[in-house]
Amino acid sequence: MKVTEKDVAYVADLSNLELGEDERARMVRDLNSILGHVDTLNELDTADVPPMAQVSDRYGVDESKQGSERFAYSSREDVLEGLRKSFTPDVALANSPDADNTFFKVPKVIER
Amino acid sequence: MNLTGLTIDAARAAISQGKTSALALAEAFYAKIDSDDPKIGAYLILSKERGLEKASEIDRLAKEDDKLPPLAGVPVAIKDVMVTKGVRTTAGSKILGNYVPPYDCTAVVRLEAAGAVVLGKLNCDEFAMGSSNENSAFKPVHNPRDLSRVPGGSSGGSAAAIAADMAVAALGSDTGGSIRQPASFCGLVGLKPTYGRVSRYGLIAFASSLDHIGPLTKTVKDAAIVLRTIAGRDPMDSTSAELPVPDYVAELDKPVKGLKIGVAKEYFGEGLEAETRSAIETAIQKFAAMGCEIVNVSLPHTKYAIPAYYLVATAEASSNLARFDGVRYGLRVKGARSLSDMYRRTRDEGFGAEVKRRIMLGTYALSAGYCDAYYLKAQRVRTLLTGDFEDAFKKVDLIVGPTCPTPAFKLGEKVDDPLAMYLADIYTVTANLAGIPGISIPVGKSKDNLPIGMQIFGKHFDESTILRAAHAYEKAA
């Protein structure tokens, strides 16, 4: 067993999840089952292999295009042209479960 | 004329030749949905107002002008992970049950600009997480080819809608096979383009470095038409590539003779069902008969794809789904004692079991002390998997293999075993990690009369060759 109930409680906390008692027990079981399989990655020596966060890491962006020149990703100019206009406050607030005309409203943040 | 059985070109032609109107066509599809969808469950939301308005616009255009846009009046439907302005978008989740987006997904905008009529939003696994569509918070989807079986996932609604003649074409999303696997299970064409080929703007993010939008259609040509329409640079997605979009349709009929087609032994190993293997082998023989050269290649790290994929995908998901907190949109539980209590209880109630499992796994893989062993390790293995394809594509133009190890399984068969569900994605997740394009096309039926799909991979941005080979196979079969 790699993942204990204590680990699950800690990770649930980081994830902003509560999880009921049944869910926690099942999570211990499922995470251990999946991570048991993940251990096969340790068969590979990757000490000299660079990590790849996304495709453009390997194929370059902008001037640094490497290998396949075909990956012509680029950052855009910092201008509004061609971009969506910002939402007005009423549009931005329309989906909020609780808002007044200007602000999103949330339960109190600071405990006294 | 069977209006709901038409392809894109046939539907457009029927309208431009006055055999039907765009409005009549849309109404025929809505009638079909009303009568057939209750037993299938493909649609979550119908966008009748928006769809019928577009159809009327096309009919006005048809009267004035004989030059109609390429998708004029063609009824399409959209996986409910792509936002639609003014039309409820749920991502198959309770947490977004009442979300009405204030903007449109680029791919949807481009379809409508080409004349397409959006009929509605299609069911899917919650936040596109799943391989059977059983993780939808609203209802499961039944495979139209056999109602006791799953349609695949996560674009299960997209596949079922096309297979049941409830739309001409659909958009799906594919993070680990979610277009290709349901296409395979339902006997359709499903294309995941190269990463960067189609803008992701307006696609509700699951794993940003792996997410793709693409078509599910009845024919290869229809897939080419949809891709041509939605592909290309979009200033709203900085990862969309600044490359010209080829005319995929014009290139369909180029000869395939002399193409080098790779077959990787790792895609024919343990776990591949005999009937599927034999159907794929027969299809490979057909390519040989068409004058293609069949070449053995190796993708040696394939067995590590599933663990690498599920670490990368869940790590990204745990970050992307942090935004669902009950403040700006979506569900909020009542009666919370504090902000933190509100977050937790909202997410607890709003997310389903699979989404929570993935958030937990991803958070664990990123947490202090485990990040190097899991997330970073998976990223290094991603490099190895991508290198496998680079090496193979030095020798061949395309690589073919099965889309899935088995045909569609029964509803309920795998719900209690998440690992078994993940392992069945073995042949599809590799293309997402490497960013290469892949298509699934139907190549036969099992003895239970269930469709079997073959997958064709190509080089980055070489969708043309994939589509050409798929089209040649479709014509020969």
Image (cartoon, coloured by chain):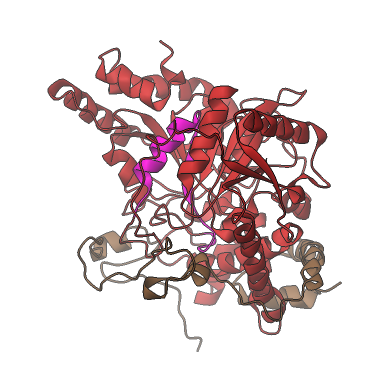
Chain colours: A brown, B red
Q: Residue at x 48, y 57 (%)?
A: B195
| Residue B387 seen | yes
Nearest the camera: B430 or B388? Answer: B388
Nearest the camera: B384 or B261? Answer: B261
Q: How many marks?
A: 0
**Is B309 situated above or below B255?**
below
Residue B387, percent from left and from top: 63, 64
Q: Residue at x 26, y 15 (%)?
A: B17
Residue B223, percent from left and from top: 45, 36
Q: Residue furthest top?
A: B1
Q: Residue furthest right?
A: A1
Q: Residue B225 colored magenta? A: yes
Nearest the camera: A106 or B362? Answer: B362
Residue B405 is left or right of residue B317, and the answer is: right
**Is B280 situated above or below A62?**
above
Nearest the camera: B178 or B345? Answer: B178
Query: In the rendered image, which quarter is residue B373 located in?
Result: bottom right
Q: What residue range appears in magenta?
A: B206-232
Residue B225 is left or right of residue A58, and the answer is: left
Residue B275, percent from left and from top: 79, 31
**Is B440 situated above or below A97?**
above
Q: Residue B427 colored magenta? A: no
Q: Residue at x 40, y 39 (%)?
A: B248
Q: Residue furthest bottom?
A: A112
Quadrant for the N terminus of chain A in the image: bottom right
Query: In the rendered image, which quarter is residue B200 located in?
Result: bottom left
| Residue B45 seen | no
Residue B304, percent from left and from top: 74, 62
